[in-house]
Amino acid sequence: MSNGSSITEFLLLAFADTRELQLLHFWLFLGIYLAALLANGLIITAIACDHHLQTPMYFFLLNLSLLDLGSISTTVPKAMANLIWDNKAISYTGCAAQVFFFFFLMSAELSLLTVMSYDRYVAICQPLHYGTLLGSRACVHMAAAAWGSGFLNAVLHTASIFSLPLCQGNDLHQFFCDIPQILKLSCSGSYFREVVLLILSGFLGFGCFIFIVLSYVEIFRAVLRIPSEQGRHKAFSTCLPHLAVVSLFVSTVIFSHLKPPYISYPSLDLVVAVLYSVVPPAVNPLIYSMRNQELKEAIRKVISWMFLMKNLSQL
């Protein structure tokens, strides 16, 4: 194949050769996907409906849940469809759309996680200035900047990757259209521009990670000075889950996109991709709500209201 225009479809990685294992993977993905939809949907509904949660921290958490819903819906449904129909194909246009939306949502999520670390820093280290530094207008601007930066990043990478001539067939050793796998199909020496973009994105992502780490160094120093054990416990309960999410997300994304070409094994690439594309959207709601009493109470109210509406509809 001389270039990308002659390719009408890509072939995604088959999870297993036997039909039984394919169905097992389908049900596993379906369970994770439904859990992510339900958990993120409950968080969005609870924050939107409970006036006690109209604070910057929960506003950013609502945006994170929206990004998680979008990112897992970009990759998992297509993988499930291929599993249930024993198919590996994805159209050229579908692959381009998947790359764009996935990169858009993942980039925006990293930016938003950085903003959320700043929110926790101000809340704990500069509580007297919290209302000034994180007013409603500032929160909207920061959230918009996170979404906007993700959109711009996705446009640049999608335009770059799909303008490359592809000479190495159309087999992608991944369960969704991932940029490192498409680069392997490009003609030798033609992918320098996209590699430069990936390196720049990697440096920006690493910069975000450094900002988050420095923020938490200051946060932990401030928390350790709190005389009340209950106060320290509450501060740690809101910060440690965020740090765990960031560490898993950033480490797996950077490893997947910037690792040397010789470190490439289909099983390793698959596990790493699942860790940054499927696991975070499914576990983020659990991590953020597990030790947050306000959010758990709001979710209980939403579930109670849903059961009440169901019972009323049956009368």
Image (spheres, helix red, strand yellow):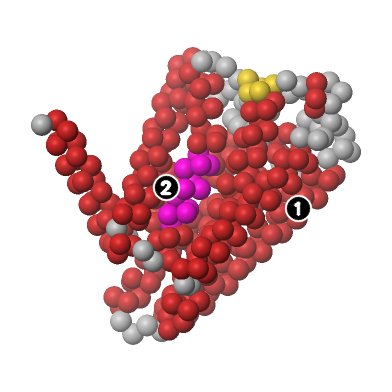
**Depth check: 63 or 22 in front?**
63
Magenta segment's dominant SS is helix
> Element under label 2?
helix
Q: Residue at x 71, y 48 (%)?
A: 258
Neighbour tally class for label 2: few under 14, some 14-19, many 20 plus, Cα within 10 Å: some
Residue 69 forms part of the magenta stretch: yes
Q: Is residue 289 left or right of residue 253?
A: left
Q: How many marks?
A: 2
Q: Quadrant of the N terminus?
A: top right
Of the image marks 1 and 2, the number of the one nearer the N terminus:
1
User: Image quadrant of residue 297?
Assistant: bottom left
User: Image quadrant of residue 186?
Assistant: top right
Give the amino acid type for the residue marked by disc 1 in the picture: Ile
Location of residue 293 with respect to 104 vertically, above or below: below
Q: Residue at x 79, y 46 (%)?
A: 195
**Residue position marked by numbered label 1 in the rendering:** 199
**Residue position marked by numbered label 2 in the rendering:** 283
Q: Residue at x 28, y 52 (%)?
A: 299
Farthest residue toward the right? Answer: 189
Residue 299 forms part of the magenta stretch: no
Q: Quadrant of the C terminus?
A: top left
* Image location of residue 22, percent across then percent down: 49, 20
Neighbour tally class for label 1: few under 14, some 14-19, many 20 plus, Cα within 10 Å: some
Give the amino acid type for the residue marked by disc 2 in the picture: Val
Range of residues picked out in magenta = 61-72
Q: Residue at x 80, y 50 (%)?
A: 196
* Image location of residue 212, percent across then percent down: 56, 66
Residue 186 visible in the displayed image: yes
Q: Is residue 161 left or right of residue 31?
A: right
* Image location of residue 126, percent across then percent down: 47, 81
* Image location of residue 238, percent across then percent down: 39, 65
